[in-house]
Structures are given as C-alpha cells and as structure tokens.
Amino acid sequence: MLLGDDILLMKLLTDFTIANWPFSFVQVSLVFGFSLFIIIIVMLIICLSFLLSPRFRFSSEKLSSYECGFEPFGDARLMFDIHFYIIGILFLIFDLELVFLFPWLFSYCNQTPMMFFGSLVGMFLFLFLLALGFVYEWYSGALVWAPVQKIE
C-alpha cells in the first residue's frame, strides 16, 4: 500500500526523464567536457611544478624569519588595536551593500509599476537601515582613529 508521499515521489521520479530536461545533451556535455578539461589542466600544472621545481634542503637560516634584512627582534605576536578589525568589518559591510544593490538595479528593467514600487521601497528600507547603522557607528566613536583628548 502506497502512501501519499510515496506516490508523489514516484510521480517525480517518472517525470524526471532526459526528455523533460531543460538543457540539451550538447549543452550538458560541453559543461562536463570543459570541467574535465580544466581539471586535467590544473592537475598537469601541479604535477609539472612539483617535477620541475628545484629541491632545497631546509636549514636553520632558511627557516628563520626575515624582517627586511635585519635579524628578528622582539616578539612578532603583538596585540593590535581593535579599530583595525572594526574598520575592516565596516568596509566589508559597505562593500557587500554594493553586491546587493547591483542586482536590484538590473532587475528594475522588466518589472510592472507595482513591482517596481515594492522593490524601490525594499531598497530604500535596506539603505535606510544601513545608513542608520553607519550613523550609530559614527556617533559611538568607532570610526575615530585617534583617541579624542578633552580640553578642560
């Protein structure tokens, strides 16, 4: 006895035939052929670089750290100021904003006026929240690089 989910699964499996594919055999074979070609080229380059590279034995001089021609001094594991990380994260956030805005820009071409208005409202809401976050960061002092000295 088959249950409803089993019947649905059987229908999906029988409907999924090569005749119902949205791609032709030539398109699929070109993609697989190109992928195979790229894999072969990458493996060939890796093998050639391994075979042709000169073999060096590592010495203590070769494994020592190099600092612009000087002998290393001090510890390399210094603590960095948190502002480096905050500025980096803020850069990523505002850089990713553009990644979201470009698809919106190109999707406006084929929309009805009502869909255009809905997308425009969504985009302005997104930009408003982003600007609100930027203003919060500005007023909280996260973008101030040097500490502010109070004059009394």
Image (cartoon, rainbow, N blue to C red):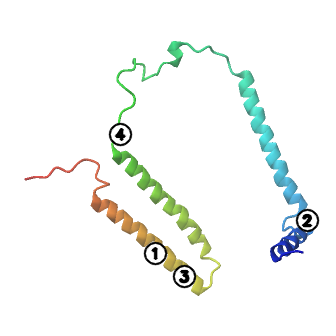
- Rounded to the nearest angstrom, the CA distance separating label 3 from label 2 is 39 Å
Which mark sits nearer the N-terminus, 2 or 1?
A: 2
State the image coordinates of residue 102 (x, y, percent, origin top left): 56, 66
In depth, the one of 51 and 2 nearer the eye is: 2
Which mark sits nearer the N-terminus, 4 or 3?
A: 4
In depth, the one of 108 and 148 nearer the eye is: 148
Which mark sits nearer the N-terminus, 4 or 2?
A: 2
Residue drawn at (33%, 60%), measured in percent from left and top?
Answer: 137
Inspect the image, locate mark 2, and give the three-letter code of the amino acid beneath it: Ile
Dot 3: element: helix
Taking the view exactly as shown, the residue that stands out farthest to the front is 1
- Whether pointer 4 and pointer 3 mark residues with C-beta atoms closer than 8 Å, the reply is no
- Residue, disc 4: 80
- Residue, disc 1: 125
Quarter holding residue 29:
bottom right
Give neighbour class at mark 2: few <14, some 14-19, many 20+ (Cα, 10 Å). Answer: few
Instruction: Please state, as top left, top right, bottom left or bottom right, where the N terminus lies in the image.
Output: bottom right
- Rounded to the nearest angstrom, the CA distance separating label 4 from label 2 is 58 Å
Dot 2: element: helix
Inspect the image, locate mark 1, and give the three-letter code of the amino acid beneath it: Leu
- Residue, disc 3: 118
- Residue, disc 2: 18
For marks 3 and 2, give the one nearer the viewer. 2
Quarter holding residue 100:
bottom right
- Whether pointer 2 and pointer 1 mark residues with C-beta atoms closer than 8 Å, the reply is no
